[in-house]
Amino acid sequence: MEDLIDDFLAETRDMLQALAGAIVAWEADPDDRERLDEIFRFVHTVKGNCGFFDLPRLKQLSHAAEDVLADLRAGRRTPDSALVSAVLGIIDRIGELVLALETGEALASEDDEQLIAALSEEASQAAPDVAAVAPAERREGERRTAVRSIRLSVDLLDHMMSGVSDAVLARNELSRRLRDMPRDVAVEAAFERMSGCIAEIRDAITRTRMQRIDSLFSALPRMVRDLSTELGKQVLLDLDGGDVELDREMLEMIRDPLTHIIRNAIDHGLEPPADRAAAGKAPAGRLAVAARQSGNQILIEICDDGRGIDGAALVRKALALGLIDTARAENLTPAQRVDLIFSAGLSTAGAVTAISGRGVGMDVVRANVERIGGLIDVESRPGLGVRLSIRVPLTLTIISALTVSAGGQVFAIPRSAIDEILRASGDSVRMEGVGDANLATVRGRRMPLVTLSGLLGLPADTESEARKLVLLKPAGGDLYALAVDAVHDHEELVVKPASPLVMAAGVYAGTTLADDGRPVLVLDPGGIAKAAQLHFEAAEAERLRPEAVVDAVAETPMLLFRTLDGGARAVPVPLVERIEDVAVEAVRFSAGMLRVALGERIVPLAGCAAPPDAAKLRILRLTDGVAELAYAFAEVIDIRALSLNLSPASAPGEVAGVALVDGRQVELLDVHWLFATFAQAGGDDRPTCALPTGDPWIDNMLRPLIESLGYAIVSAGDDVVADIAIEASGESDPDRAAAVVRLRNDPQPAGEGDDSIYRYDRAALLSALHAARRRAHG
Amino acid sequence: MADLLLIVRIAGRRVALPASQVEGVVELDGLTPAPGAAPHVAGLSSLRSRVLTVVDAAAALDAGQNGAHDLTHAIVVPSGGHPYVLLVDDVEDVVEASAAPVQITAPLGTGWNRVALGMIDAGDDLLLFVDPHALIAGPAAVHV
């Protein structure tokens, strides 16, 4: 806490210094809107921060000043010299208080009220005498010296960084010279030591610029707790991605926006518990803050499950404030309406509170984010919540990258986008050209292939077979293969923005310096995909024009497999939930058909007429989204995207038809028939389970569980003979069912001969049910 | 104090650049091509751990570009927050401007219209006064 206060004081002092010019300018011209906004933001920030700390005097002063400035901004009051002086008096007092806090001195508080009173309209009319609020004499007391950290300007860090980089370059130069000279062990040892030192310094300075976002997140739980207590709301905070590293400067720049957004979310977004209950939501609101590195950006998302942003209310406000005209208001899309929240001076809060609600937050937030080249997006679902995402560029950060070369030149690729690296000549890779477009098939998966040297117009100096393939998955894009001449090394690189002239190429994310001091371009996987995709579309259009649209039939990925009797069959991949090996004991001919027990479920089994002889059975788990079906098979042949030219089967059955794939006959499974036959039959022929009646625990807890296992429930006591009977306690009646499972309420067995199962021992219960069933079917 | 002018030779012509915009004159050590970048960009180079975008001044004028870049005369000009260097044929001198630039009356060659701010009296000669930022922006800036 001490550290945070120190930070706050230092920050406020810095802001005051920066504001000095604005104050003077505003005094000279009170109608200067820009200056007014600047001063307003200052007091707003101070107010927000000291709400977080326990600094009532600062809070009172800044709140009062903010009220007046908000009136000025909204045009409810006009600035006159008395009012300007009164505001300046407050700002001076804030400065004195900050100084007093830093030096640990006390500052008399009696004239705070006087300063605040001077702000009121009556005061400015009645007492134009400004002498009363003339700034008090500034005290330059001795500042507290016991601080454990110092504040450095990022410029200085940059300077240090560039100095160290120079040292590295000089070291490399020296190393080259040393190699040309006769060996001298003493000199070499000294050189090695120097190299080590430089590497260490470089490391340390690099780290000074990077900070885990944790340092930002760690303050959030307390802030959220305090806010929710103050507002009488319940908030569950969910933080994720604290290990994402951000450039220190970026971190500082997003601190305030993030704080504002979270305040807004709790204050306006999340409803009080009663309202939430009325809306059918859990009483505690959820607030999720997540950070992740996404390609060459850091993405920070803040989601709440509150009431959402009222777009119509925003439009009304904007109209009332004259920010938009009626014609424009009518043409706004819902997304544009919500975007109005970023307009200056707009807020949907009905009441002004100490937390937020003056509409300052969001315009300041956007300004701050955009200042660092970031983007902010808001997405609101009325009644369901708001998702705000902040994207800040990765440039200036250190990324882990792979260096590759193409056309004799070295490039770097951010590792975050790299899925896999393969030899182009490898067994699992096939490359084929379709017109101008190239495709790579890696283990049955087909993807666009981009040759880096070709894309960049560099001479290709390697045979295509000798190339390496880097499979890239850009953030939000699809996987593609990038062919490069050689793959070199993984390196940690400091990425700097490239000039617009270079960025115009659209395929670069920035530049960096290699160890030998030469510049290296960092590739942007998303940009390459874009550049190449255009190329593909053009090629595709070219190819399709003469030959009509025959080839344009949609291809479906098909799983080709060998059945137990050796035939080749195919099934659409999306229907396959997964492939699983099951013990053959799990397969039983029960209740009229083959079934397989999969975990807690019993699933109809197709693909074989009787349980096979082998110990293990391989099954495809097929699903239509509701019902599930297992299909026994021998092995997977391939996964291929196919547009099958199907010859229909002569009669309805497991197979819909047959097609040629690579000169082989492949039968396509009629999945519809399979589900219609097996899954349906499974419903009709459910085994029965007798349950005691009248016990709420049985009705509400046990019954759904048993039903989910595929049993039909009958009431015990009927004369129905069930496959399995479950008895909660007491006497048994074994005649009624083939198998009986006894439950008890006590976790401990009653005695030696007690074979009952504790009723919450789910695993034992399930296995007992399976065992009972096997006994029942002998 | 009179403004200082840097007298350089671009595409065979002697021109004056405002010295206040120039950070220094250096000799570049190596050039990394930047394929796909604007056509007048010769590539990238590094200077004291900074990555510089190297602009071929003659190419920026559409005055032709020979494959080999002469890296001996490079003028460092920060522009729009990024460091650039202009490759010129020769760097001659720094002189004081004796008067403010004047309107151009004679027609100029291809590309020069775009970058010339006027004529300026530099010592004994009347030279074309060239805006280095317009040179950096290059031909594309006009087409857009």
Image (cartoon, coloured by chain):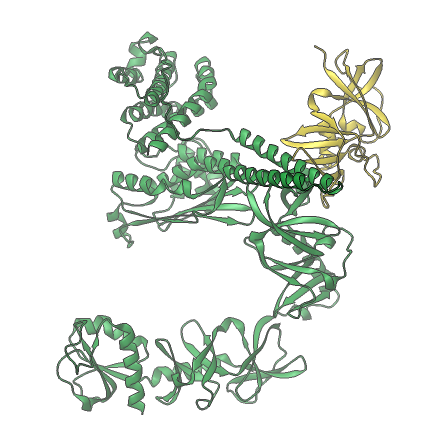
Q: Is residue A110 above or below residue A278?
A: above
Q: Is residue A294 left or right of B50 when viewed as pictured?
A: left
Image point 50% across, 37% down: which residue? A208
Whether residue B100 is visible to the viewer of this picture, yes or no, is yes
Whether residue A473 is visible to the viewer of this picture, yes or no, is no
Image point 29% across, 13% down: which residue? A123
Quadrant, the C terminus of chain A: bottom left
In this view, the residue in front, A412 or A727, is A412
Q: Residue A552: horizontal and vertical position, in percent? A: 65, 68
Q: Residue A603: horizontal and vertical position, in percent? A: 39, 80
In this view, the residue in front, A164 or A50, is A164
Chain depicted in yellow:
B
Q: Is residue A457 left or right of A314 when viewed as pictured?
A: right
Image point 41% across, 27% down: which residue? A11
Picture quadrant of residue B124 = top right
Q: Is residue A286 above or below residue A602?
A: above
Chain A's colour?
green
Picture quadrant of residue A85 = top left
Q: Residue A493: horizontal and vertical position, in percent? A: 60, 44
In this view, the residue in front, A191 or A7, is A191
Quadrant, the N terminus of chain A: top left
Picture quadrant of residue A419 = bottom right
In this view, the residue in front, B8 or A592, is B8
> Residue furthest toward the left?
A730
Q: Residue A214: horizontal and vertical position, in percent? A: 42, 43
> Residue furthest toward the right?
B12
The count of marks equals 0
